[in-house]
Amino acid sequence: MPSEIGGSMIELVNIKKTYIDGDIRVEALKGISLTINPGEIICITGPSGGGKTTLLNITGGLDRPTSGKVIIRGENLADFSSSQLNEFRKSIGYIFQYDFFISTLNLIENLLVPASILQLNSEEREQIVTKAETLLDFMDLSHRADHLPFQLSGGELRRATIIRALLYEPDVLLADEPTSNIDKENKEIVMEMLRKERGKRTIVIATHDIELLNIADRGFKMNFGELIPLDFQ
């Protein structure tokens, strides 16, 4: 459930990420600085392998930078205790590039897994079930609620991933290629859902789909580890 982060939602300060494999050294991120304000939608475009996913993972506390700082409430994320880091992660909704669902659970059961992890009481769980049903209907997935993941198409799984990310009212939504593997009609549905979330939560989108710039407040291009502002409005 959401927690108040306040102030500038997230501040990235000179973030660098270097991967070393034997004699090969790859600078995935080359000193990126960015202030992400509460309630805005930021879209980061660019080709695959350019560093977009790495930046999202560092922003959400799933990975650590080689150097630089992720500042939350004026504190360096690297200095958070385990409990503080867990609380921060609870305030993040993740739309991963690849869909991860438990193969033995049907769709609605998969959506409710975090409710057990968060130890919601019966009233909170009932509210989540009601919201899940509403989102399934919006995403045209109500008829798939009792289907197992292998019975869903790639596009249906993609839409379900977005529902799962929004279901628990995160303060920040990190979306990695949210419109991949879906047709034009369903892409419009996804874009409309993301547009409706403006102001409710901060959204950072990493994508090669430049149409998503149409719903963003600010846009950037990731070019081999460097973040370049776009003047698109």
Image (spheres, grey):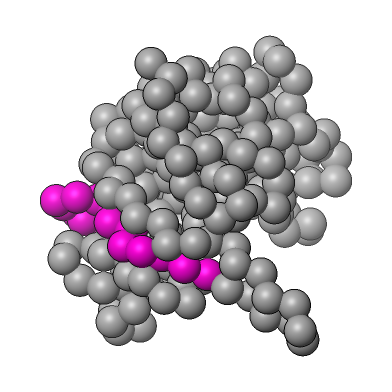
Tally the marks: 0
Q: Could you tell me residue 113's position as x and y percent?
A: 56, 58
The residue at 46%/72% (across/down) is: 65
The residue at 68%/41% (across/down) is: 47
Q: Could you tell me residue 34's position as x and y percent?
A: 33, 50
Q: Find out whether residue 54 is within the magenta segment.
A: no
Residue 141 appears left or right of 197: right
Residue 53 appears left or right of 93: right
The residue at 27%/30% (across/down) is: 199
Compared with 37, 136 (above or below) is above
Quadrant in the picture for residue 26: bottom right
The residue at 61%/52% (across/down) is: 224
Compared with 7, 219 (above or below) is above
Quadrant in the picture for residue 225: bottom right
Residue 120 seen by the camera: no
Magenta stretch bounds: 1-17
Residue 120 appears left or right of 53: left
Q: Could you tell me residue 27's position as x and y percent?
A: 60, 67
